[in-house]
């Protein structure tokens, strides 16, 4: 077993294949599937489908790990029909099985096939899968289908809410989409700093700076600590509005709350103070920047 593990760590397919041939020659069948699974994983990782399939077909102990390794072999080589066949032949599926299938269809953007496989397999109670698919559709801009899965998810966690908010604000250039994101934001039972940041950044990216500032105020009143992405988006909104007073308030909050002056925050503050011709404050923030580039 030591030699097998050494091959795995070194990604040494040639030596691993020799060991496999040696075991077959001497009719060695381990009591547990660990050794064969490790070899199967290596063959799959190296894209050696024929070797992986031959090993799999001759295994006496096949578990979910074995099936998932074979599944990943077909996904890696883009053999979609074989991928679907193996998936359907599996006695049961876990999150890795679904992830492999979803990742393949998402990467190659077969939206209908994602929908088809999940509905046909009947995993309506698998919250992990439905949340993952919601994220795929939201990422690629198919917000209507993302909403279909989101509405049917039995347990909505903060991740699924954030995925939908990101999907709506990413569509941009239409106030309706941003308003839809805000309605979803309002429905979240427990908002964390990521939820607040997603919505604030969404407003800022869609030229709704006033809304970003108002929501930031609500965030602070809700005793939620902003991060550097929240702060930089709010300061950028102040710069676009040339609102010095709001920018100074945010700058003061950054200091009081001991939020790190990262490149993002410091750059946004420099931009604000330069636009408002407050050169001393611009210089002060410029001096705190850990890294300076041509723009700053």
Image: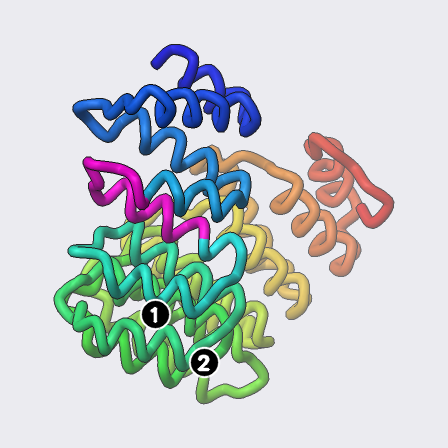
Which residue is under mark 2?
A: 142
Q: From the top left corner, tell me how far across and down residue 21 is, in percent.
A: 43, 26
Q: Please tell me which residue is depicted at 64% across the width and 70% down the height of the picture.
A: 241
Q: Quadrant of the N terminus?
A: top left
Q: From the top left corner, tell me how far across and down residue 151 is, in percent.
A: 22, 78
Q: Please tell me which residue is depicted at 38% across the width and 66% down the height of the picture.
A: 135
Mark 1 → mark 2, Cα distance in angstroms: 9 Å
Per the image, is 217 magenta? Answer: no
Label 1 SS = helix
Determine which quarter of the picture holds residue 80: bottom left
Determine which quarter of the picture holds residue 36: top left
User: Which stretch appears magenta?
Assistant: 57-73
The residue nearer to you, when weighing 29 against 218, is 29
Determine which quarter of the picture holds residue 11: top right
Lower position in the chain sequence, tag 1 or tag 2? 1
Which residue is under mark 1?
A: 134
User: Is 153 displayed left or right of 45 in the figure?
Assistant: left
Q: From the top left corner, tell me how far across and down residue 174 is, in percent.
A: 53, 87
Q: Is residue 23 above or below residue 63?
A: above
């Amino acid at each position: 077993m030591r030699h097998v593990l050494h091959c795995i760590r070194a990604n040494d397919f040639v030596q691993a294949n020799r060991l496999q041939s040696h075991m077959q020659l001497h009719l060695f069948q381990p009591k547990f599937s660990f050794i064969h699974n490790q070899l199967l994983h290596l063959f799959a990782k190296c894209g050696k489908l024929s070797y992986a399939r031959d090993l799999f077909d001759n295994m006496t102990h096949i578990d979910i790990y074995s099936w998932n390794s074979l599944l990943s072999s077909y996904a890696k080589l883009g053999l979609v029909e074989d991928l679907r066949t193996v998936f359907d032949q599996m006695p049961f599926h876990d999150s890795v099985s679904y992830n492999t299938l979803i990742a393949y269809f998402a990467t190659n953007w077969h939206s209908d096939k994602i929908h088809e496989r999940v509905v046909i397999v009947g995993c309506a109670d698998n919250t992990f899968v439905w949340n993952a698919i919601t994220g795929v559709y939201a990422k690629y801009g198919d917000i209507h289908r993302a909403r279909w899965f989101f509405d049917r998810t039995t347990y909505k966690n903060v991740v699924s809410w954030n995925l939908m908010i990101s999907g709506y604000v990413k569509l941009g250039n239409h106030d309706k989409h941003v308003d839809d994101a805000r309605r979803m934001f309002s429905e979240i039972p427990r908002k964390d700093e990521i939820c607040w940041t997603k919505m604030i950044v969404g407003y800022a990216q869609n030229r709704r700076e006033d809304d970003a500032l108002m929501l930031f105020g609500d965030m602070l009143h809700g005793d939620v600590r902003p991060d550097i992405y929240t702060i930089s988006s709010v300061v950028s909104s102040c710069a676009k509005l040339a609102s010095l007073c709001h920018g100074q308030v945010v700058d003061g909050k950054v200091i009081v709350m001991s939020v790190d002056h990262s490149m993002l925050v410091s750059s946004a503050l420099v931009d604000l103070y330069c636009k408002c011709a407050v050169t001393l404050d611009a210089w002060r923030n410029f001096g705190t920047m850990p890294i300076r580039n041509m723009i700053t």
